[in-house]
C-alpha cells in the first residue's frame, strides 16, 4: 500500500485525441463563444440522451438556479432544503428571495414533503427541492402541493444527471430543473450547467436572460446577465457523453463494493424505490460527530480525504433571514461523510478505505 493522495472525487478526462480534434475545428472556424455550433450540438445530444424536451446550457450550476428564478419571476419566499450545497441557498439570497427551510427526512436526506405545506404563506412563490446525492425527491407529493397553492417548482438536480423516475427523466418534473456540469460531477463540461424547461416560451426567455437580455441587435426585452457556455466547454461535454457508459459502469462497481462491505457497519441513505441511481456519491451516516471525526482522521492519516457533504446545515448560515432551526438537518450534517468515489479509483485503494472504516468502527 502506497500513500497516494485519494480525494473524495477526481475529474474524469475523456479521450485527449477526440478533444483535440474538436479543438482543431474550433480553431478552424474561429467561433469560440456566443451560442456556437458545438453548444447547439451538445444541447441537442443531451436532450436526446436525457429524454428531455428543452435544454439551455449555461456557464455553471449556480447561475442555472439564478436564471431559473428570474425566468419564473420568483419573488418573496421560497421553501427549500437546509441540507444541500451552499449554492442552493446563496442563489436565492443573491436574488432577494428569502429561503424558508423545510427540514429533511433523516433516511432519504431529501426535503420532507410533509413539512412543506405548513410553511406556505401569501409571500411564498416557489418550492426549491434538491435531489440529494442524486436520490429522487418525492416529486409527486411536491408537485401536488405546488399545484394546490399555485407555486412554481425549481428542482436543484445538480446531482441527478441521468436519473429516471418511473422510467422517465426526473428532470421533467417541476417548472424547471437545473443541472451542474462542474468538473467534479458525473458528467461535466469543466465548468457549466443547464436548465431543463418544458415550456417553449420560457425557453426563449431563458435564452435572452443568459445573453444580457438581448433578443437581437435592436431589442433587449429582459434584464439579463452573461451566463453563456463556451465552445471549449461544450466539446468537453460531447467527449464526455461518448464515454458515459464507461463512467457509469465503473462508478457502479465502486458503489456496490462499498455497499457490500460496509452494510450493517454504517447507515446508508435510503433510496427512492421509483428512481434509478447514478452512483455519483457514496455517503455514510455515523452515530455521532465523534465517530465521523475519528474515521475522517484515520483516513486523513493515510492521505485519504473524504468530504463532509453537507456541512454545515444551511439554516446555520449567518446571512439567513429569518433565522430558522432545522433539527434533523443539523444532526445529519454533523455525522455524514462522503467516501471517495470516481471511475479510476483502484480496487486496492478502495479496499484500504473500507478496511480503515471497519477497523475504526470496531474501536468505537
Image (cartoon, rainbow, N blue to C red):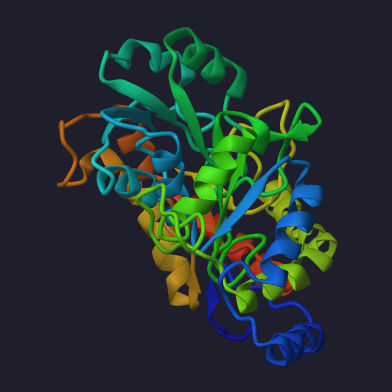
* Residue 283 shows in this picture: yes
Front residue of 185 and 99 = 99
Front residue of 214 and 300 = 214
Q: Is residue 240 left or right of residue 65?
A: right
Q: Residue furthest top?
A: 148
Give percent across and percent down for residue 353. 59, 65
Which of the image's four quarters has the N terminus?
bottom right
In the depicted structure, whether residue 167 falls above or below residue 60: above
- Residue at (21, 46) in percent of width and height: 317
Q: Is residue 132 left or right of residue 101?
A: right
- Residue at (16, 46) in percent of width and height: 319
Front residue of 348 and 57 = 57
Give percent across and percent down for residue 130. 49, 37
Where residue 102 sits, quadrant-wise, is top left
Front residue of 304 and 243 = 243
In the depicted structure, whether residue 302 falls above or below residue 322: below
* Residue 267 shows in this picture: no
Q: Is residue 124 left or right of residue 1?
A: left
In the depicted structure, whether residue 100 falls above or below residue 25: above
Give percent across and percent down for residue 135. 61, 38
Give percent across and percent down for residue 15. 79, 82
How many numbered markers are drawn?
0
Q: Residue furthest front?
A: 218
Q: Is residue 100 left or right of residue 144?
A: left
Amino acid at each position: 500500500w502506497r500513500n497516494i493522495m485519494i480525494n473524495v472525487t477526481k475529474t474524469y478526462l475523456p479521450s485527449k485525441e477526440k478533444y483535440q480534434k474538436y479543438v482543431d475545428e474550433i480553431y478552424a472556424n474561429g467561433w469560440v463563444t456566443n451560442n456556437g455550433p458545438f453548444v447547439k450540438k451538445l444541447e441537442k445530444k443531451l436532450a436526446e440522451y436525457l429524454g428531455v424536451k428543452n435544454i439551455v446550457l449555461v456557464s455553471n450550476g449556480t447561475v442555472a438556479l439564478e436564471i431559473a428564478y428570474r425566468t419564473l419571476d420568483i419573488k418573496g419566499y421560497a421553501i427549500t432544503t437546509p441540507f444541500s450545497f451552499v449554492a442552493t441557498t446563496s442563489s436565492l439570497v443573491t436574488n432577494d428571495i428569502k429561503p424558508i427551510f423545510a427540514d429533511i427526512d433523516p433516511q432519504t436526506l431529501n426535503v420532507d414533503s410533509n413539512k412543506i405545506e405548513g410553511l406556505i404563506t401569501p409571500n411564498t412563490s416557489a418550492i426549491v427541492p434538491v435531489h440529494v446525492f442524486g436520490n429522487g425527491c418525492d416529486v409527486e407529493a411536491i408537485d401536488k402541493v405546488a399545484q394546490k397553492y399555485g407555486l412554481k417548482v425549481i428542482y436543484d438536480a445538480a446531482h441527478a444527471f441521468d436519473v429516471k423516475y418511473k422510467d422517465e427523466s426526473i428532470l421533467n418534473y417541476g417548472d424547471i430543473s437545473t443541472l451542474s456540469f462542474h468538473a467534479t460531477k458525473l458528467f461535466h463540461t469543466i465548468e457549466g450547467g443547464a436548465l431543463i424547461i418544458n415550456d417553449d416560451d420560457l425557453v426563449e426567455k431563458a435564452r435572452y436572460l443568459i445573453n444580457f437580455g438581448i433578443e437581437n441587435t435592436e431589442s433587449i426585452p429582459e434584464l439579463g446577465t452573461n451566463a453563456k457556455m463556451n465552445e471549449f466547454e461544450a466539446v468537453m461535454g460531447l467527449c464526455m457523453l461518448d464515454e458515459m457508459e464507461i463512467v457509469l459502469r465503473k462508478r457502479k462497481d465502486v458503489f456496490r463494493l462499498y455497499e457490500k462491505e460496509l452494510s450493517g457497519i454504517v447507515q446508508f441513505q435510503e433510496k427512492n424505490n421509483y428512481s434509478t441511481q447514478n452512483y455519483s456519491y457514496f455517503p455514510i451516516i455515523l452515530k455521532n460527530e465523534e465517530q465521523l471525526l475519528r474515521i475522517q482522521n484515520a483516513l486523513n492519516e493515510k492521505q485519504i480525504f473524504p468530504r463532509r457533504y453537507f456541512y454545515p446545515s444551511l439554516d446555520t448560515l449567518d446571512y439567513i433571514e429569518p433565522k430558522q432551526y432545522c433539527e434533523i438537518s443539523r444532526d445529519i450534517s454533523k455525522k455524514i461523510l462522503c467516501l471517495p468515489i470516481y471511475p479510476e479509483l483502484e480496487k486496492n485503494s478502495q479496499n484500504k478505505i473500507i478496511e480503515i472504516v471497519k477497523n475504526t468502527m470496531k474501536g468505537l
